[in-house]
Image (cartoon, helix red, strand yellow):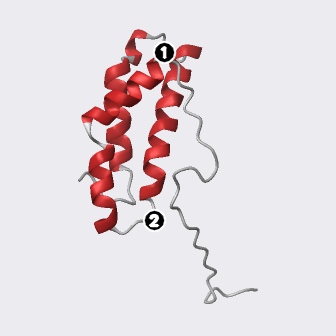
Amino acid sequence: MASTPAGSGAHLIEMLQILDHLDPAELDHNSPEYIDTVSRVFRATFADNVALKCMDFREAAPLERDIIALERAAAWAERIAGGDRVVVRSGERSAVRRISALSTSRATS
């Protein structure tokens, strides 16, 4: 794997694989079409990778392999090229758990 599941290796690999199918170099840099295409790729990969963020490595490894599969990138690229807006709703496909901590050893003045 590219990095630990909580890292961004799989996320980055998936983005680049999708972009390989869409060829954003054909679009004018920072044009509305370019920004729209790249943002849809970001949303697609976020939807796939958000579930990995709080998983144990052993649990996440099989899912990570599926996410970086070339077939998955091709399927996302086809959806995006076909006009799919890739809407990600709050809580969708998410196994993320929030953990907050407050340091009690911090001196206050």
Residue 45 location in percent, x, y? 44, 40
Element class at badge 2 = loop
Q: Residue at x 35, y 59 (%)?
A: 5
Q: Which residue is mark 2?
A: 54
Q: Residue at x 48, y 10 (%)?
A: 28
**Front in this rendered view, residue 86 or 26:** 86
Distance between the alpha carbons at the discs numbered 2 and 1: 35 Å
**Front in this rendered view, residue 4 or 76:** 76
Residue 34 location in percent, x, y? 51, 18
User: Pointer 2 and pointer 1: residues touching (CB < 8 Å)?
Assistant: no
22 over 99 or under it: above or below: above
Q: Is residue 65 left or right of residue 102?
A: left
**How many neighbours does mark 1 have within 10 angstroms: few (below 14), some (14-19), or many (20 or more)?**
few
Q: Amino acid at mark 2?
A: Cys
Q: Please tell me the numbered disc located at residue 29.
A: 1
Q: Quadrant of the C terminus?
A: bottom right
Residue sitting farthest toward the left: 1
Residue sitting farthest toward the right: 109
Residue 70 location in percent, x, y? 26, 34
